[in-house]
Amino acid sequence: MSKSYFDETHTAIGHPKSTFMQWMLTVDHKRIGLMYAAVMFTFFFVAVATAFLMRLELFAPGAQFIDGDTFNQAFTLHGVIMIFLFIVPGVPAVLGNIVMPLMIGAKDVSFPRLNWFTFWLYILGCIVALASLFTDAGFADTGWTFYAPYSLTTSTNVIFTLVAAFILGMASILTGLNFLVTIHRLRAPGMTFFKMPLFVWGIYATAWIQLLATPVVGITLILAILEKYFGIGIFDPAKGGDPVLFEHLFWIYSHPAVYLMILPAFGIMSEIIPTFSRREIFGYRTIALSSASIAGIGYLVWGHHLYTSGMADTAKVIFSFLTFFVAIPTGIKFYDWVATMYKGKIILSTPMLWALGTIITFTIGGLTGVTIAMIGVDIHLQDTYYTVAHFHYAMLGGVVFLFFAGLHYWFPLVSGKMYNETHAKIAFYLQFVGFNLLWFPMFIAGYYGMPRRYFDYLPEFQIYHQVSFFGAVIFITGLIYMFVVFFKGWRNGKPSGTNPWNATTLEWHMPSSPPPLENHSKVPYVDFNPYEYHHGEPVVKFDYETMKRID
Amino acid sequence: MDVNNTLQGFNTMAATFAKDVDQAFWINFWISVILGLSVIIPMFYFAWKYREKNVKDEDIENVTHNTALEIAWTLIPTAMLMVLFYYGYTSMQVLRTMPAESESIVVHVEGKKWSWKHTYEANKNGFVHKSKELYVPKDTNIILKMTAPLNDVIHAYFVPAFRMKEDVVPGRVTKQWFHSEKLGTYDVECAEYCGTRHSDMYTKINVIPKAEYEAWFEGNSKVGPGEKEVEKSKGQELYDDNGCAGCHSIDTDATLVGPSLKGIGAKHDATYLKDAIVTPDKDVPEGFTAGVMPPFALPDADVDALVDYMTTGK
Ligand code: HEM
Ligand SMILES: [Cu+2]
Ligand SMILES: [Cu+2]
């Protein structure tokens, strides 16, 4: 048996003998991706548990078993973990790291040591973020948005969270930088930009956002820290500062950040749909360029979060208008994906089920986003559960669902084994049904005027919260089920072989399964498009020793 | 709190512009349904039509372009989205185009942790009405000029039945207006997160007949129209005006945000209580944190009156 990346590794310093130290010091992109996955999903479960706590509390109006302050800390903890620890590093840190270099025929990212450093910076950020749980003042209660002046005056421990968000932002910038250089410099010869798989395009567009937008939030967080602890008077109205300025600065980053979450996820969709339709993708260039244009226009729409902040009406109109122009390229992608299924052969394996399920949930998430891009309507719906339901449909029903799709898709690549498909499908259906039950009622509650971040609510909203609670139970059951399926697959799954899905892109052309430490045996020459099928069979075939084409 | 929790009028349209907002919402809803189905129906259809069993490998076709279709699915949704942008814009216009102040009643709103206060312009006698709930005549333009104290945080004045909302920002005056043609009582909620009792920051808007409003407004009653005036001491008035009740209960032992003030006179002397109002961080009772209660810079006489009220109930 040839050696896989589990058997040997390169390390940042020295040649440690112990397996443990080899993992801690590894610079191999595949191992680093796996370590991100382990840490991120651990936190994900903490955040899900926190969310379940909130759902339990909201089962009936009035206090059930926690008080208002604890509830406020709970949604802050949930939001901070989900955003800064989980979904912002998200798909790039895990699947970008593992798959992107393989897809472009590289041996690793451009700066493997920097990649290692970034991982540990991320870990430091996580520790600082959660450390305040154990201080006297307790975890921040500001919401994940840290709006001034509330964050300046609260007695809870916001400094840890702000510093952590800053560190995590730093890690995000470094990941972006590393990936940008990798994609520019390490593509296999012959692979022009328009021969890259679309997942790489997603990672590429994202990397620019990470690099250019994240510094803005870094500066904002520093200003907030200086304001809170040194009273410089930028945001504090009592000193002549402007709290609304904070909102602007915050959203200048945080709006592009939502595209930073979704673009790599769209990339996953673009890999899965052609593979399981056994044909070439429809509108390759349109999809690639729409990612780029979303990343571009995404910088100019942040004001749609501030329609009720007292901003000038002219500014609202401009922001609203631009926002509609992000919806267009997004919509086109969906038509392209569906068109890819036309005259294909649709194989409903688990990754495809997740992808198709997401077409439904993200369509709802995207179109309800259009509702609140409409100024007059948003004035009513802003800061209600309609908005909360919208972003859960987009982030959970969009990004996270596609993340899961990607995990199922690349699981055999990473582990060399196959999970049990039947059980994996049951887990999908549970989560799909649970999710819709969990969040759809909240659109209605929001429409009738149920504000967000409410610990207590008027009795008329109870029915929606109760349905939502049962949805959460089903969803979380499915979630746990899915991870059990993964664990079992990892331990006892059948060997998958190098290309179990009959896919075309380079990561499926490995000499062995799981892949060896330095990936492909030789750097391939890429004179073909990423999704070339003929009569349902991949066109391009390689001799895995020489990486020469043999078709 | 004293606003009892019943949902009032959320599903009614009680302001003139509510119908514009709802119209924009429902246009959006139906266009969304069309756009959504234009993706989801073909998806299901293809997944069924080209299902694995049904397709022979030779029949797979690599269709990668279709210019006419691509133009159609770019331009048609774009046109629909522009319609939505337009209705978003027009519904904003009716919400945000303030009527002339000369043809409206102006009411000043102060939102602070965690209560609302409405202050009217002086009436003929020079008397200024202040009230927790808002009383307005039917069929009249009302302009709200809203702000929060400098040492407070952002709130938002949200009236679901009117479909209107605007942030209430310390150090700024934001405005919104409405015109209601429906008598009734409508809930106001705080929609911008403001801390511990954010979800208790309710008040109400009472739309009453014009004559009733006039009679009340020109009088000097210290309570709302139709309410029986109870004699209030100066201390109690200050206690209500300054929103102490938002954080302290005084008739019961319930701990809200601060400790209950019931029987406080037996526990502390007047000096302590004065300090507790003017410099609350000086002595912090056990189980509470400093920095939550804002310092109140009130004239000495007012502080004395408050202390009297707390110790004697008068
Ligand atoms: C198990 C599934 C989930 C449940 C049951 C859940 C539930 C909730 C609830 C009840 C709230 C509080 C809403 C409020 O009071 O305003 C909330 C807020 C939030 N959730 Fe989730 N959620 C889930 C998954 C996610 C995921 C996957 C993400 C992102 C990746 C996410 C991101 C957020 C954010 C950013 C907030 C706002 C926090 C804030 O207001 O500061 N949630 N969620
Ligand atoms: Cu945004
Ligand atoms: Cu509030």
Image (spheres, rainbow, N blue to C red):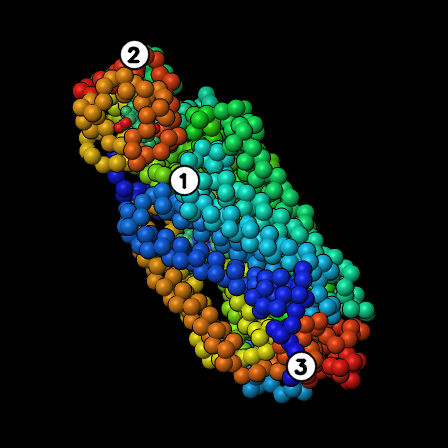
Label 2 sits on residue: B301
Q: Residues within 10 Å of mark 2 (few under 14, many from 20)?
A: few
Indicate the amino acid at tag 3: Ser
Q: Given this view, does label 1 or label 3 mark the residue nearer the observer?
A: 3
Q: Residues within 10 Å of mark 3 (few under 14, many from 20)?
A: few
Label 3 sits on residue: A2
Quadrant of the rendered image containing residue A230 = top right
User: Are dots 2 and 1 in contact, CB under 8 Å?
Assistant: no
Write down the chain letter for disc 3. A
Q: Earlier in the sequence, mark 1 or mark 3?
A: 3
Q: Quadrant of the C terminus of chain A?
A: bottom right
Compared across the picture, whether A535 is left or right of A72 comes to right
Indicate the amino acid at tag 1: Ala
Residue at 44% in and 42% down: A140
Residue at 48% in and 33% down: A152
Label 1 sits on residue: A137
Front residue of B182/B125: it is: B125
